Image (tube, grey):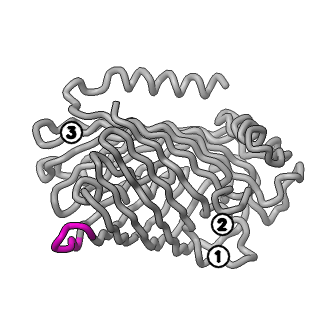
Amino acid sequence: MKNLLLVISILLIFFNVKHAQSKTDWVSFTVDNDIFLKSDSGYTNGFSLTWYDLNEGYYKTTPNAIVAPLLWSVSLSNYSKVYEANTLAQIMMTPEDISQTSPPTNDMPYSGLLVYNYAYVASNSRYADLISTAIGVVGSASGADSSQSLVHNVTHSEQPNGWDTQLNNELVFMFIRGRVWRNWVSSNRRMDFLTHAEIKLGTIMTVVNSSFMFRFGKGLGATYTTPLLNATRITNPVSIERGWFAYAGVNAAYVFHQIFTDGNTFTESHSVDYKHEEIGITAGLAYSWHDVSITFSLNDFNVLASQGDTALNDATSYGSVTLAWKY
């Protein structure tokens, strides 16, 4: 609990010293849960609170120092719009059978992650770039066991019994560099086609992936950067300023490492074998009023997994609901 309060306090201080020239701010709250797909194992729960600072044309904010190692990869003079997303998130991973006090060696370990993620997204009419850094903690310091017990009390679900076997406490990090291209726009501007490429590097996970997304809706030009945030698993595409869109996409990835299945980086802990190649699908709907937006999505980031590949299959299938509002 002390670790959780410390992280929240640091984040609130950061929010209070944000750039005074920011024109429009949005806040979003996202709930991820595999119960949307009638499951209760693998990626069980996720919660995230995100603060967006939108800066268009008249003012280009300087990226936070936390992404300094990635600044060499972008040219800040190439963009007309910039926004920053600060996210505090907590996610919980469990094995298939949560009634056992010690999970089987061939199933997911119990693990929780409390993480702060800073994302800097800069765009023009043709493409958008992402540089992002995540810093957090896994293990009991994440508070994931208490959060899941609370959620299961509220939903009257079976209580998990194996959190005493979760991963050891460890400070973790991840750098993310991504780009999305707006390859095609229909003549009536109601449809577009996006492609996306990304590299994640760190102790949370190391992954290379690419994807494409088809969208249909209104106000698409203002929201085509959303695949850059969707891939982080702690945010969702958000439609803003009275726009809306439905979307569907396919993702291909190679996972070199992820702490939720490989276990702790520097100490011995429960780990499980898995297929490193992933093919995933995602679909959803985002709708906004003037100052409120809601998004619902379903995600299965590993359709290649067979029924016997319980660990990674359960870890990558979940639904999400995001509520956003203008601050």
Q: Are marks 1 and 3 in contact (CB under 8 Å)?
A: no
Q: Position of residue 17 (x, y in %)?
A: 32, 21
Dot 2, crowdedness within 10 Å: few (<14), some or many (≥20)?
many
Q: Where does the C terminus fall, quadrant-wise?
A: top left
Q: Are marks 2 and 1 in contact (CB under 8 Å)?
A: yes
The magenta span reads: 183-191
Return the mark for residue 55: 3
Q: Position of residue 135 (x, y in %)?
A: 49, 39
Dot 3, crowdedness within 10 Å: few (<14), some or many (≥20)?
many
Return the mark for residue 23: none
Q: Nearer the viewer, mark 1 or mark 3?
A: 3
Q: Is residue 284 left or right of residue 221?
A: right
Task: Give amino acid for label 1.
Answer: Ala
Task: Give amino acid for label 2.
Answer: Leu
Give the vertical position of 252 relative to 35 (above or below). below
Q: Is residue 265 left or right of residue 128?
A: right
- The local secondary structure at tag 2 comes to helix
Would you say residue 184 sits in the magenta stretch? yes
Q: Where does the N terminus fall, quadrant-wise?
A: top right
- The local secondary structure at tag 3 comes to strand
Return the mark for residue 305: 1
Answer with mark 3 or mark 2, whichever residue precedes in sequence: 3
Residue at image x 65%, y 62%? 37
Find disc 2 in the rendering and name its residue: 312
52 vs 6, nearest the viewer: 52
Dot 1, crowdedness within 10 Å: few (<14), some or many (≥20)?
many
- The local secondary structure at tag 1 comes to loop
Task: Give amino acid for label 3.
Answer: Asn
